Amino acid sequence: MIIEPEDFKKLEKLWLRRAKINSIILGTSAILSILFFTYGVSQKIESERERNMRYEIEVSSKKEIAILKEQLAQCLSEKNK
């Protein structure tokens, strides 16, 4: 099969057009994947921050409960005297 120079130019333009379309699709996919990755990382950081805050609140609440129990015990022991 012999390819004429004119036909070769048409094929070359077609290949270039397909290559451009493929590069646009792959580039867009890469950008979207980077955006989703960044969003996922930011969500993970936020959830860890919230988890740490909940833990701190839980610890401080347990301390307050222990103090209140001690005060209640003292009040009850003074009342029984």
Image (tube, rainbow, N blue to C red):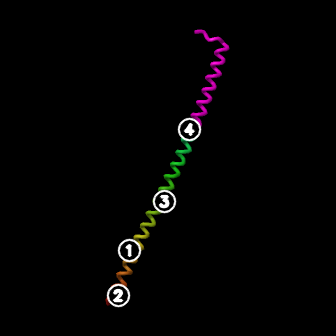
- How far separated are the C-alphas under marks 3 and 1? 24 Å
Which comes before the other along the chain, label 3 or label 1?
A: 3
Residue 69, position as x, y percentages in the image? 37, 77
User: Which range is magenta?
Assistant: 1-28
Classify residue 8 by image quadrant: top right
In the picture of the structure, the residue carrying the numbered disc 1 is: 66
Q: Which residue does the image show at 42% across and 67% down from the upper left? A: 59
| Mark 4 in CB contact with mark 3 (< 8 angstroms) | no
SS for dot 1 = helix
Per the image, label 3 sits on a secondary structure element best described as helix
* Position of residue 31 in the picture relative to residue 69 (left or right): right
Decide which of tag 4 and tag 2 comes sooner along the chain.
4
Instruction: Give the secondary structure at mark 4.
Output: helix
Disc 3 target residue = 50
Q: Which residue is mark 4?
A: 30
Question: Which residue is label 2 attached to?
Answer: 78
Whole-angstrom CA distance, mark 1 to mark 4, is 54 Å
